[in-house]
Amino acid sequence: MRKLIFGLVFAVLPALGLAAGGAVPLDHIETDHTNKESLQRGVTLFTNYCMGCHSMEYARYKRVADDLGIPQELYEENLIFTGAKIGELMKNSMSKDMAAGWFGAPPPDLTLETRLRGESWVYSYLRGFYKDESRPLGVNNVVFPNVGMPHVMVELQGLCAVHPNVGVEASVEPLSGNINNGDLCPQYASEGSMTEAEFNQAMYDLTNFMSYMADPVRVERERLGIFVLIFVAIFFVFAYLLNREYWKDVH
């Protein structure tokens, strides 16, 4: 018993350490795996902006295409750039040794990233880059300080010149009516091709897709869960009646 207790303690401590280390203000979101339009936009963003460095090697292209309602021929033609076949795992062609030399460490596989970090963390991180000339790549991140990743979405968002207002609620001054912290980026060092609202939606779509990849059977599991609960409720009625019949003559 003592060994079991110590084992549980040592198993839980790393998780507690991760949670404590990740205690940063976040913008919370609720993902929707039934929104196929959002998931389709998300896989497009991931393929074009993330998959040059990151992989999702615990999933297959075919499963994604089928689940998202994308014809396999269309998916293979527009969303596979490595020459892989539709039935293969979602790997990229970057050498891990080269990546480690460029970024300090190989970019992680992102299949289970939202399960590890949380959906709100990923969404906030994607929107949290800002200009920092002291960093090797010229950018930093309010959610993940001193991260070794470049701001790959800079052409969409632009580059924030100061800390973005991630996890900061907007407030209204009672006398002037001015809104404080209403914008994600108070000041831009360079403009992007999207408005703030468009970029926020794009990052939601990307996070929504990554959330789906981490748990592709969630919709089916939740659907089956309803039937299981109905079965349990009906079974309880019969179990109760049977129990009452057994004990009716016991005084």
Image (cartoon, helix red, strand yellow):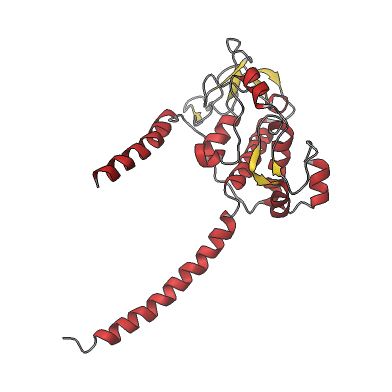
Q: Quadrant of the C terminus?
A: bottom left
Question: Is 209 or 89 nearer to us in this picture?
Answer: 89
| Residue 3 higher or lower than 225, as above or below | above
Q: Position of residue 144 (x, y in %)?
A: 52, 25
Residue 28 in view of the camera: no
Residue 194: x and y in percent read 72, 30
Q: Position of residue 209 (x, y in %)?
A: 64, 44
Left/right of residue 148 with respect to residue 65 in the rendered view: left
When asked about the image quadrant of residue 16, the answer is top left
Name the image quarter holding residue 123. top right
Residue furthest toward the left? 251
Residue at left offset 65%, top offset 23%: 97
Between 231 and 25, the one nearer to me in the picture:
231
With 187 as the anchor, is 87 left or right in this view? Answer: right
Q: Position of residue 151 (x, y in %)?
A: 65, 23
Which residue is outermost to the top? 134
Question: 96 or 28, which is in the foreground?
Answer: 96
Count all numbered tags in the image, as a single digit: 0
State whether residue 244 appears in this view: yes
Q: Nearer the viewer, residue 174 or 35?
A: 35
